[in-house]
Amino acid sequence: MEYKQRVEEAAKKRFKNYPDMSGDELLSWDIPRPKHGDTWGSWKYDAVRKVLILERKSRNWYEVDLELCKTKTEIISWLLQLKDKTWITSTNLGNLIMALDDVLKLRKLKQ
């Protein structure tokens, strides 16, 4: 399931006035954590192996090892490496950034 869709469904159950909840309501809510199998476009989260997998043509095409993404610098290195690939699309790169943020909480990572 698309992670964003799962979060939206959880918000609809939690808030009677969704999507017009207050800032206080939002701050008091624990957003659901990504689960094994959640997707962001063509990227799929494997919580067992701790990787994000880019799926193309119904097969695993490329993996980002989340164990190697401990700092913002390491994540930028992955993104720059992928940016130079001829097969990556801007949509796939954007979805990867969203997946990394949802899974790793980028704002909380060290430099």
Image (spheres, rainbow, N blue to C red):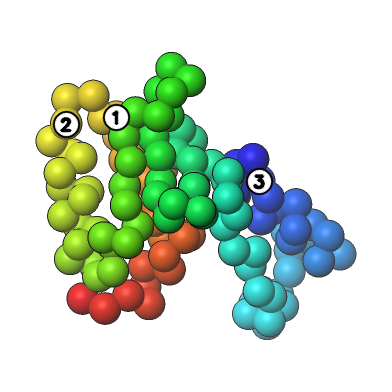
Residue 8 visible in the snapshot:
yes
User: Looking at numbered disc 3 in the image, what kind of residue is underneath it?
Assistant: Gln
Crowding at dot 1, Cα within 10 Å, few <14 / some 14-19 / many 20+, comes out as few
Reading the image, the residue beneath label 3 is: 5
Q: Is mark 2 on a helix, strand or loop?
A: loop
| Residue at the outermost front position | 48
Quarter of the view holding residue 55:
top left
Quarter of the view holding residue 18:
bottom right
Crowding at dot 3, Cα within 10 Å, few <14 / some 14-19 / many 20+, comes out as few
Q: Distance between the residues labelled 3 and 2?
A: 29 Å
Q: Can you tell which mark lies on residue 54? A: none
Image x and y of residue 90, in percent? 30, 34
Image x and y of residue 105, in percent? 43, 68
Task: State which mark lies toward you, 2 or 1.
Answer: 2
Relative height, residue 17 to residue 85 (above, below): below
Q: How far apart are marks 3 and 1 (CA)?
A: 22 Å
Q: Distance between the residues labelled 2 and 1?
A: 9 Å
